[in-house]
Image: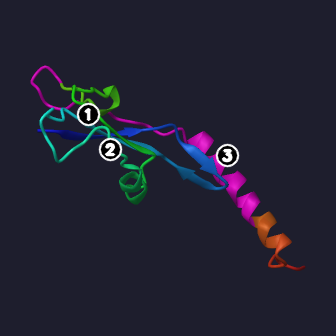
Amino acid sequence: MARIQILELPTEHHGDDMITPFAVIVDQVPKGDDSIDPAADYSNVAKELGARAIMLFHDTVDIPANEVPVDPDGYPLQFRVEGDFEKLHEQTQDEILKAQARMRDAGLGRRV
């Protein structure tokens, strides 16, 4: 039976928006399966899904980013991620200044 995986591609920046493009990977497609044709054009399906591409393979394709690390007992490892609040403060200040500049340019700033 075929399986479906998502491969995240490098993040793109479009103005203030960050977009994480992705590709859909379908692997382990049985060679005699007539319902899935690896040679077919799936660009319309990809477009409907918002994917950059759909790739089909008869063989197994392992995507390292999709692997879940496990501890010696077989349970998923848990990670603790601590934020860099100094950088967050700087980014927040920058965004506030940008918003104030846009408001000023639009004539919405405070008048004293």
What is the secondary structure assignment of the residue under circle 2? Answer: loop
Classify 67 as above or below 7: above
Residue 100, disc:
none
**Residue 98 among those drawn in magenta:** yes
Question: Who is closer to the viewer here, 13 or 87?
Answer: 13
Crowd rating for badge 1 (residues with CA inside 10 Å; few <14, some 14–19, many 20+): few
Q: Which residue is mark 2?
A: 40
Classify 59 as above or below 112: above
Q: Where on the picture, by quarter, is residue 63? A: top left
Q: Nearer the viewer, mark 2 or mark 3?
A: 2
Q: Which residue is mark 1?
A: 78
**In the image, which residues are magenta?**
71-99
Residue at left offset 13%, top offset 40%? 33
Q: CA distance from mark 1 to mark 3?
A: 29 Å
What is the three-letter code of the residue carrying label 1?
Gln
Q: CA distance from mark 2 to mark 3?
A: 49 Å
Q: Which residue is mark 3?
A: 90
Residue 28 in the image, given as x and y percentages of width and height: 18, 32
Residue 32 in the image, given as x and y percentages of width and height: 12, 35
